[in-house]
Amino acid sequence: MTLKVGIIGCGRIGHKRAESLPQGYLKAVADISEESARRLSCLYAGVDYSRDWRAITRNNEIDMVIVSTTNNSLAEITLAAVESGKHVLVEKPAARNYRELDPVLKAAENNEVKVTIGYNLRFHPSFMKIREIVGDGILGNLMYIRGRYGHGGRLGYEKEWRADPMISGGGELLDQGVHLIDLSRWFLGDIIEVEGEYHTYFWKMPVEDNAFLRLKNKNGQLAWLHASCTEWKNTFSFEIFLEKGKLQVDGLGGSYGAERLTCYQMLPQMGPPNTTIWEYPFPDPSWKIEFDQFEHIIRTDAEPAPSLSDAREILKIVDKIYGEGP
């Protein structure tokens, strides 16, 4: 049976989400800008549009809602959708802080619906390959992780919604930094120790443009992370160091450069390692893979991943860096 999907938030990410859906799944869209909602609906036959997001959460024909709004609305809309008995894919970070997710977690349990978080980097082909290699154990146990994610902003960046803490909840740490935290937790598991700093070096705005983190799990394995919007050249690099080699992802496609996974496998005599490279040209398939997995989770009654609990733990880490967490 075809899932009937509604999208709330018709900006760039809303368009990406619509493109990722199988034909005929999208039934309705909404945005506070009626023109944005109309523009997206016109791309697909038979799709209703509205400037009131409640038109989707109250629509009994909708099975699943995708929430791709600004951060200040994510938790509120997710809660309303869940209370209406709908499954939800909500964009990261799912809320401005972990406390906003507490009623959502309770409602999702009470209404027996599935909620997943839009951490689509997990579904990039390089990371799916890394999970396979790490799982095989051929490179031994994981030792530590090093990650960088950043961009250079654009003219007027300091006036956009991401620079308004009432809307965004924070700066670069809550924007791209949470992707690095999610990927680190995916490989390290629960984090028991968090240290870090955040600074505003360049952009004249009340949120940070750089964040530096050190995360440690119960086994003493570390992640060293840096998120920046003073990178000037869009950059993504994620390295996993293991006992017998290293796995390194560079680029995410588009302005971040071609996505490439390099495996450096140590030889018994050491010296220069065996090197294997996988390259993944655009277009980015992660959005479709992510949706397909969530549909499978819904149909098989499996546990969502990443889950609301994952989102809450990530936001608790963010709050600790900001000095607001427990």
Image (cartoon, rainbow, N blue to C red):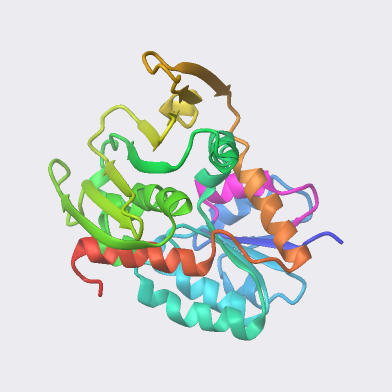
Instruction: Look at the image and tell me whether residue 77 can be seen.
Output: yes
Which residue appears at 47% of the width and 32% of the height?
252
Q: Position of residue 77 (x, y in %)?
A: 52, 72
Identified at 55% across, 53% down, the residue is 10
The quadrant in which the C terminus is found is bottom left
Q: Let me know if residue 234 is in the magenta part.
A: no
Q: Residue 5 appears in which quarter of the rendering?
A: bottom right
Relative side of 221 to 262, left or right = left
Residue at the extreme bottom of the image, as rendered? 110
- For the N terminus, the image quarter is bottom right
Q: Is residue 101 above or below residue 261?
A: below
* Most foreground residue, 147 or 283: 147
Front residue of this view, candidates 205 and 254: 254
**Looking at the picture, does residue 283 appear above or below residue 288?**
above
Residue 103 lies, in percent from the top left, at: 47, 82
- Is 15 in the magenta? yes
Total numbered badges shown on the rendered structure:
0
Residue found at the very far right of the displayed protein: 1
Q: Note whether residue 169 is visible.
A: no
Residue lying at 28% horizontally and 49% vertically, measured from the top left? 172
Where residue 83 sits, quadrant-wise, is bottom right
| Residue 318 % position (x, y) | 29, 61
The magenta span reads 10-26
Q: Nearer the viewer, residue 254 or 50?
A: 254
